[in-house]
Image (tube, rainbow, N blue to C red):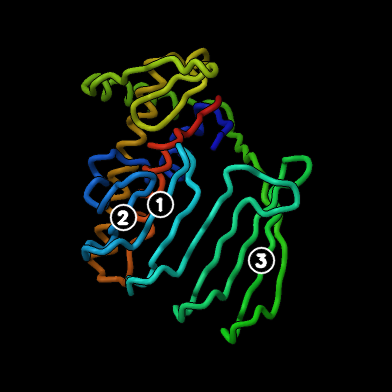
Amino acid sequence: MRVSTTISGLISVLCCHFVAASSPNALASFILESAGNKVYLDLNRDGAADQINSYSGRVLIRKQRDRNFDKKFDWDSQRSVVVKKGRPFKRITIDNNFDNKTDRLENYYQTPNLKNERVEIHVDSDYDGKFDFSYQQLIKTVQHKHYPPCDQKFQKLAVTLKKLDRQVKKISLVLDKGGDFFSTDFGFKIDSSCFDKWGKEEFLSLVQDSLKKGLQCLMQLDETHRSEKKAGVSGALQNAVDLQLLMDKNPIQLVC
């Protein structure tokens, strides 16, 4: 994932889009088993795997979910490592009424110009075992979001965060030989342009503090979900686990 942003929009990006980017320690208790190329997750803590992530190297090639915790997987996403012309590189099958039959099928194709993904969606709306309508969508392959220049309020916030982070252990950096990116120990690769514009220590402190605040927000949302005794796993927890595994396998790239 690559996000094109300015420093003034970084907090909103991290706290909203990356709110679930938490530390491995906070999410380790949900990992039931990690064997070979598979990670088994127990999100409702009943001792049974309700999500399985399968990898080929660092690439997530399959994700299976048991959304209603009946010990049967009702959501399955599979991705090909190699994209072949005219063939879907990703396929998602969904059983929304939990009768062990697929009632939604999504096929993802790469367009010739590589700028978009074409999605063919087939739906069985009456659950009779037959798809009764289909439609298509186009999704941009690379999504950019631009923010306005820095303002005084943001600059004051940046100064405050810098003071707070003086008490935080400094983040170790290792030059990524594959390009002008620096790898952090919290799942991000940061383009050197961010440091050129805003300074290494200031930028890293801001990112780290945003991630910490995102984790606190996430825990509060999940706690509220559980206190209200709502069914299923909270979306906050689901996104947290998914994003943490993504960052562990394939760090998110920030470009300024």
Q: Of helix, strand and loop, which one carries label 2? A: strand
Q: Is residue 10 above or below residue 16?
A: above
Q: Residue at x 60, y 53 (%)?
A: 90
Q: CA distance from mark 2 to mark 3?
A: 28 Å
Bin the neighbour count of mark 3 within 10 Å (Cα to Cα): few under 14, some 14-19, many 20 and up: some
Farthest residue toward the front? 36
The answer to whether any part of residue 19 appears in the image is no
Q: Nearer the viewer, residue 79 or 12?
A: 79
Numbered tag placed on residue 53 in the rendering: 1
Numbered tag placed on residue 224 in the rendering: none
Q: CA distance from mark 3 to mark 1?
A: 23 Å
* Residue holding disc 3: 121
Q: Position of residue 149 (x, y in %)?
A: 57, 27
Tag 2 near tag 1, CB within 8 Å: yes
Q: Position of residue 256 (x, y in %)?
A: 55, 24
Q: Position of residue 8 (x, y in %)?
A: 50, 29
Q: CA distance from mark 2 to mark 1?
A: 8 Å
Q: Amino acid at mark 3?
A: Ile
Numbered tag placed on residue 41 in the rendering: 2
Q: Nearer the viewer, residue 28 or 38?
A: 38
Q: Of helix, strand and loop, which one carries label 1? A: strand
Q: Nearer the viewer, mark 3 or mark 1?
A: 1
- For the N terminus, the quadrant is top right
The answer to whether any part of residue 114 appears in the image is yes
The mark that comes first in sequence, 2 or 3, is 2
Q: Amino acid at mark 2?
A: Leu
| Residue 93 shown left or right of residue 123 in the figure | left
Q: Nearer the viewer, mark 2 or mark 3?
A: 2
Bin the neighbour count of mark 2 within 10 Å (Cα to Cα): few under 14, some 14-19, many 20 and up: many
Residue 160, quarter of picture:
top left
